[in-house]
Image (cartoon, coloured by chain):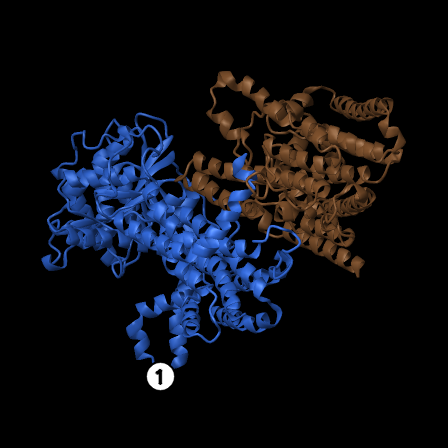
Chain colours: A blue, B brown
Amino acid sequence: MGLLTDPGRSDKFAKLLISHHTKLSVVVYIVGLCWLFALVDDNFNLRVKISENALLPGLVQSGFATEDEGFAKKAYKTLIEQQKNGNGSFPADEIKDSFRKIGLDVYDHFYNFQNRSSADRTTVQQGRNIYAILRASRASSLESVVFAVPYRPASTKHIRTEGGIALLLALANQSKHKHYWAKDIIFLVTSNEHFGAKAWVEAYHGVSQASKKNFSDTPLRGRGGAIQAALVLEIPGSDIDYLDLRLVGLNGQMPNMDLFTLTRSLFGNQQIPLVIQGNAKLLDRYPEDFLGKYLRDLETAGKMVAAAASGALEGIHGFFQQCNIQSLSVRGLTRSGTGGRGKIGFRDLGITLEGICRSLNNLLERFHQSYFFYILPSATRFVSIGLYMPPLGLIVLPVVLRALALWAKGTSTDEPDKASVNSSTMGAILPWLLLAHGISFGTFFGHVYLGRDLGLTLGVSTFLAFSLPLLASRFMSRADADLLKSVNLIEMAVGLYALSMLNFSLALVIAIVSVPVAVWATAVTAHDSPIRLLNALLLFVSFPIVPLIGRSVCENWSDLLALVPHWESVIVHSLKGVSASFVEYSEYGNWLVPVAFLFLLPLWISNWVIFWV
Amino acid sequence: MELAVLVGAAAAGFALRSGLIFSDLPKLVSQRVEFSVPTNSWQRVLEGSFLYDSGVDPYSGDIFHETPLCLVLFAVLKKRISCFGIDLIFPVLDVVTAFLLFFFARNLVQDTIVSEQKAKEKHASGTSKLLVPFADIVTVPRMVLLWYLFNPHIIGSCLEKTTSVFTNFLLAAMLLSASQGPSLLSRLSSLFFLALATYQTLYMFLLFPALHLYLLQNAPEKCRSSRKFHIARLVIHLGIFGGILAALVIGSSVIMGSWSFIRGVYGFAVFAPDLTPNIGLFWYFFTEMFEQFRTFFTWIFFLNICIYSVPVSIKLRHDPPFAIFTLLSLITIFKPYPSYGDVGFYLSLFPIWKRLYPHMRQSLVVVVMLLVAAVLFPILWKLWIEVGSANANFFYAITLVFVASQVFFVTDIMLAHEKREWHLMNGMKSDVDANGKAAELLLD
């Protein structure tokens, strides 16, 4: 019964904690950081491997021949012409016809959407997706595989995708008469970027759009089975230099690692250069020296962490992942020096895609063998959840230690008669907690659901948050502040650990920055010391709205400089990034904004209040 | 002033619930596994009532597990009042329950203070600080009321329209009538409500020993020493409880025209065939188990719930309400389909034993574990069921954290109770052992 009822040890532990927690916190934080950075090195991480035996990659003879390449090239040429003739509008009917000519079932999917980041944000527009289903010959339509291409007009800022559509047609044509398909193959062409893809995936899974008033989509008329995997192709044409695999989906979601390994190994078999997360340095020769190698891996891993932490959409594969479908995007890129004359053509890509499709066709169960939580420092090494969680635990540990130390200080006397002096109760700090959460919730709710102007809600909440200490200095005692600090730190630790399950990268980025700030800012310092000024500055910079604005300021630095004398437009411009984040939240559920406003802001407000007591 | 606070709190609690019940929130969080389990889900009540109306035996399928009386009651309500009215029953009943608990707390604190003041000369010197202060007569009931009205567990299960709301009402009524004094009426009504609660959710019969002792506590002093009196009372109480329960069950079979509800309600509660994940311990264990061991473990698990009833009642015979509290939490921990509604109910009773708080050592750990569980249940559910990247082990791990936090809580509060008793009898000063160190209280 020792664990719960032994009275002696917890007292000793509390005393130890109170006297040593600062030193311990510093050590733990530094050890955590070092450990984290060590994970990038090959000695501390693992080699990627295929865990699902059923995939059997590369064991089949390829059927994608020269005439299929010719078919793809022809399709590509026609597509470009149709694009020119149609003034850049989506040549849906033409693509539909091409699929029908091949002999597949082709269906339309009409959907409505509002583009809130464009000028006419309230108009409901209609979009159209095309999809064709190749019915499995060896099984009833219980499972399926998706090849998807987001159609983009010629004027797009992103990578063009006509090559991808041509490949879809060629693949469909080549595999039409094959007798070995056990899964339906769905060829999907979506339009309007994420709107179309999201609408299609939701319609496929019968997610009701009824709750959103303006979005009465037509139901899908043709369906295959449960989708096991989806491959998104963003291939501009037939002359590319290398491929870029994008794995990170919405909110740091990753596909099962088997899908990644499968794609990587099959592209590798075909001698196609491959990078991950757009790190073109992976194309260079492998560095010989330790440092060069380490830095390259660190950069790759860093790019992946940054992409996951921002939560933003990297490609339409994110929506498939949200519905339990393993999915990734393949981007075809050209090197800047070669002038758009890459060596990789439709033949290589076709052979690989056919191989991937044949492997997926072998799947007996859903992807479940390999890892779902991982970070890739290079295309062949990975850091799994079991490896990266302990360092995060250490990095957040100072918060826990400080909270426990403050708690122990408040309740250190064991005799009930002494405890009442110089102590506080939950009742006394409850109003402050409610206020801090109320202000944050009000800001978020006011803008997202009541549609109040962003500048107004941010302004009001900033004003309220910054003026709260005036109230606090009158009504809050030192003991209250200590207890509030402790509760605040506990909330922060719980929140960070919980967030690390959802989106490890975001939790990591927040933890690395905010743990020292929170622990440092809650240190007791004399009112006139210069450190206090530094504390105030640190707290001010960590105001959650500041980094959000800071991000957009950094991105549009040159635009802003040009506007400098007109301060009003500077403010509007710098808020653009924040409002874009809000749009990302309401359009496809990027959780960056909710995390900032519902988790970080209340913590910050409490810390700010405590600071001035 | 006091009245204004109470009415204000009740109005706020009611407005919060009825405001939320008609908002979009219930749709957003509908059928959360933390709140809705097969034995209390409102969806299943609707389904069962539809089957009943269409002339199909609702217990023949695997959906409906409410009692026949509940079914009939709902059928009557459905005819008499609108959908809107039925939605409103839940907030109203919650507020009524809160007031029942309020009066129960007041009675109990009064009784405790009276008996403690009476026994004062038996206590060691210098322990008067440990006694329940008179101010508690005002503050404790108010805290119980507020805790019940604004407990997120309770609010959530009200919004989900779980039938835990009814069970909690019955339990609160039982507690209040038991605390009303030695009159026959109070004994009768408390046994009646216990029988109803047992009829509604099987495991409540485990409260009988503790309730029996509680009812004895109010008996006149001189009778309590005679053995005859004790036996007579036990027989009478058992008879009343058993009689009412039997009447309810037989009445139900008359209403339904068959005994199939026994399997559907009580068989279901014992054998737990529905292994949908919930916040309890059963589902994972029984999904992992080989089928041939199922009967064996079903009975082991059933025994595990039942085994605490008598020992806890005997150990805490001097404080039967506390025994009821402990048993309620133990039943919630170990029963096959626990929900936040049950957890919230016993947590709301905690302020009554506020005096134990200074003796508790794990309160921080328990609160943090409860918080972690509350945050991680929905997250891991999403990762497992919707996104598919986590698996059952993740969710079960958090279930274990949740159950462990409750076990910590029960252990801690029982130990605190015993410690306080010991200090009352032996004084605050601890003895010095042979090595010159202060001796400490240990539980071995």
Question: Where's residue A222, x and y in %?
Answer: 39, 38
Kindly tell me whether residue A344 is visible in this rendering.
yes
Report the number of discs: 1
Q: Secondary structure at mark 1?
A: loop
Question: Disc 1 designates what residue?
Answer: A565
Query: What's the residue type where badge 1 is placed?
Result: Pro
Q: Tell me which residue sits at (39%, 80%) in the image.
A: A567
Q: Which of the two residues, A30 or B25, is positioned nearer the viewer here? A: A30
Q: Quadrant of residue A577?
A: bottom left
Quarter of the image with the C terminus of chain A in it? bottom right
Q: Tell me which residue sits at (61%, 39%) in the image.
A: B441
Left or right, residue A474 beside residue B245: left
Q: Tell me which residue sits at (37%, 82%) in the image.
A: A566
Q: Quadrant of residue B241?
A: top right
Quarter of the image with the N terminus of chain A in it? top right
Kindly tell me whether residue B69 is visible in this rendering.
no
> A503 above or below B296?
below
Judging from the image, mark 1 belongs to the subunit labelled A
Left or right, residue B415 beside residue A611: right
Question: Where's residue B132, x and y in %?
Answer: 75, 49
Q: Which of the two residues, A380 or B273, is positioned nearer the viewer here? A: A380
Q: Residues within 10 Å of mark 1 (few under 14, many from 20)?
A: few
